[in-house]
Amino acid sequence: MTERRASRWSKILGVLLIAVGVVAIIVPFFAAQTMIRVMGWLLILAAIEQGVEAYQSRSEGGLFLKVFLAVLYAFVAFLLLGRPASGDAVAIVIIAMLFLLDGITEIALALRTRREGARSEWLFAGGAISFLFGAIILYTFPVNSLWIVGLLVGIRLIVKGIEQITSSLPRVKPGAGQPSDLSRAA
């Protein structure tokens, strides 16, 4: 797959994540079982997206952390889909823990890729948002948990979609497109 074609798919995945995030924000009061199943499938999509991202950017470093996130998303998705009747409380705690682990991992990945000169602002912001959302879910547990989870998952999917789109944009090297010192002097 060419880099241009891979970039196009990354943008499509990003737009899809944003669209699904908007839907999740609009209808946060899904019935508990439906919401758990939908989130499980969304996490499978996120695991696929993260795996694609890991493969596409393997030369940038941080491959282990990116693959770890893909496996983490898939693991939690299969837990949610395999045990939807075990109760909302367990699913909400699992989702909160996923947010916390996702936040820590993405912040670490952003710090690592920043040292290597890659764009990492959205990655860092997404990690910080995930960590904050995990803390909010645990703090409000169990009073407003289902409503909060629906809203925060929607917001996080939108941010993840933006991360995906910005990571697929061409990278501009610092100073590119600016006249050199010699051409300014002439």
Image (tube, helix red, strand yellow):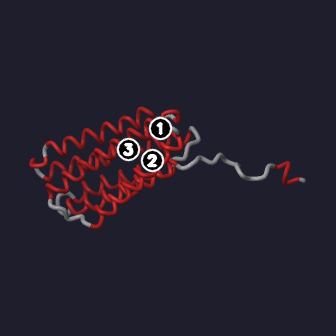
Q: What is the x, y in percent for residue 147?
A: 22, 63
Mark 1 closeness class: few <14, some 14–19, many ≥20 residues within 10 Å: some
Q: Residue 10, labelled with which disc?
A: 2
* Amino acid type for the residue under numbered disc 2: Ser
Q: Earlier in the sequence, mark 2 or mark 3?
A: 2
Q: Nearer the viewer, residue 77 or 168?
A: 168
Q: Earlier in the sequence, mark 1 or mark 2?
A: 2
Quadrant position of residue 32: bottom left
Q: Nearer the viewer, residue 60 or 141?
A: 60
Q: Residue 13, labelled with which disc?
A: none
Labels 1 & 2 near each other (Cβ < 8 A): yes
The residue that label 1 is drawn on is 56
Asked whether the viewer can see residue 120, the reply is yes
The residue that label 3 is drawn on is 49
The residue at the far bottom in this view is: 26
Seen in the image, is 50 located left or right of residue 44? right
Asked whether the viewer can see residue 124, the reply is no
Distance between the Cα atoms at labels 2 and 3?
8 Å
Labels 2 & 3 near each other (Cβ < 8 A): no
Quadrant position of residue 116: top right
Q: What is the x, y in percent for residue 165?
A: 47, 52
Q: Nearer the viewer, residue 43 or 134?
A: 43
Distance between the Cα atoms at labels 1 and 3?
10 Å
Residue at left 35%, top 45%? 102
Residue at left 33%, top 59%? 21
Residue at left 32%, top 58%? 20
* Amino acid type for the residue under numbered disc 1: Gln
